[in-house]
DNA sequence: ACCACGCTTGGTAATATAGCCAAGCGTTTT
DNA sequence: AAAACGCTTGGCTATATTACCAAGCGTGGT
């Protein structure tokens, strides 16, 4: 019996999968947009400016990871956030970036490759 | 309603870079561990169970993205979290996963009646 | 001085990701 | 019924990521 139980590798893999699904600018953009309400693929395609097939694949990734859900109505497929708490990640990122910028006077954010 | 200014693509790219740095089980594992205090590469290597060179490269990725910072003391290099707020991501992921699991009890396709 | 240690970096191969175009499929419109 | 529409999927190429081993480099110990 350990007093502290470190999360298992599987749990980290589960979490990494979610992070990975979020780790793309277009997908973050779409999530942000979906934070304002449901959108059809056409609208999202216009938003991110890629081919619709690309957008559709991004949406599939988000769906597979439980971030969005879809619903077909007429000719269109509408996507919406499955759990609004995904938007909390944006807050996390905001504070991360803010913190980084205030610290970055020092030496980080750079590759410390001081080969002269 | 005042039109919302959507964050620019650059901002989403900035954020995606951070997410990407976090999107690997070993890196999440190390971050979690560093949440308990600083660790040298050796300790982290033992923790994740990969080759030390692999771990070192993971740490470089975290460093480049402002998530950790390093300090050489004697023969070892100690890493620590640069901003503890990165740990908030774990909470986000927890609630995401929890929410996903509780939603997936219900069928995801039966949402048609919410339409007015 | 020399060697052992701790870590980083270069090299390389396997795998994964992202993008576009083309084709397919179901629904709606004409 | 046929055409148009909205979206998804298959195919492909280019690029990125990850892992290991081997080699290099600075520090500490003997």
Image (cartoon, coloured by chain):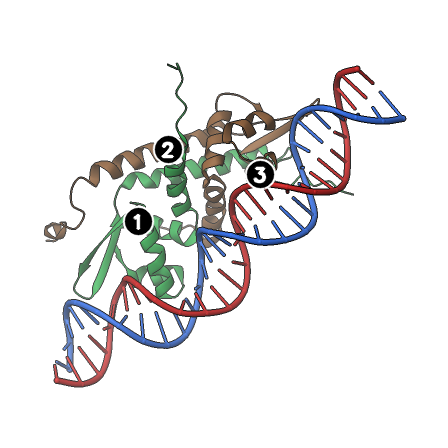
Chain colours: A green, B brown, C blue, D red
Q: Which residue is mark 3?
A: B54
Residue C6 location in percent, x, y?
66, 26
Camera-side residue of B26 and A91: B26
Q: Which residue is mark 1?
A: A64
Direction from residue A32 to residue B60 in the image, left or right: right
How crowded pointer 3 is (Cα within 10 Å; few <14, some 14-19, many 20+) is rated as some
> Circle 3 — which element?
helix
Q: Which mark is residue A11?
A: 2
Q: Closer to the observer: label 1 or label 3?
A: 3
Q: Are marks 2 and 1 on the same chain?
A: yes
Query: Is residue A37 visible to us here?
Result: no
How crowded pointer 2 is (Cα within 10 Å; few <14, some 14-19, many 20+) is rated as some
Contact check, label 2 and label 3, Cβ < 8 Å: no
- Which sits earlier in the primary sequence, circle 2 or circle 1? 2
Q: Are marks 1 and 3 on the same chain?
A: no
Q: Which mark is residue B98?
A: none
| Chain of the residue that carries numbered disc 2 in the rendered image | A
């Amino acid at each position: 019996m350990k007093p502290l139980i470190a999360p298992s590798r599987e749990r980290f893999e589960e979490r990494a999968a979610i992070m990975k699904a979020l780790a793309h600018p277009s997908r973050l953009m779409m999530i942000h947009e979906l934070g304002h309400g449901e959108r059809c693929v056409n609208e999202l395609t216009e938003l991110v400016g890629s081919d619709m097939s690309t957008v559709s694949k991004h949406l599939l990734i988000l769906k597979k990871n439980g971030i969005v859900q879809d619903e077909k109505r007429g000719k269109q497929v509408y996507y919406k956030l499955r759990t609004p708490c995904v938007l909390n990640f944006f807050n996390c990122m905001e504070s991360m970036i803010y913190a980084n910028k205030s610290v970055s006077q020092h030496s980080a954010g750079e590759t410390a490759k001081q080969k002269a």
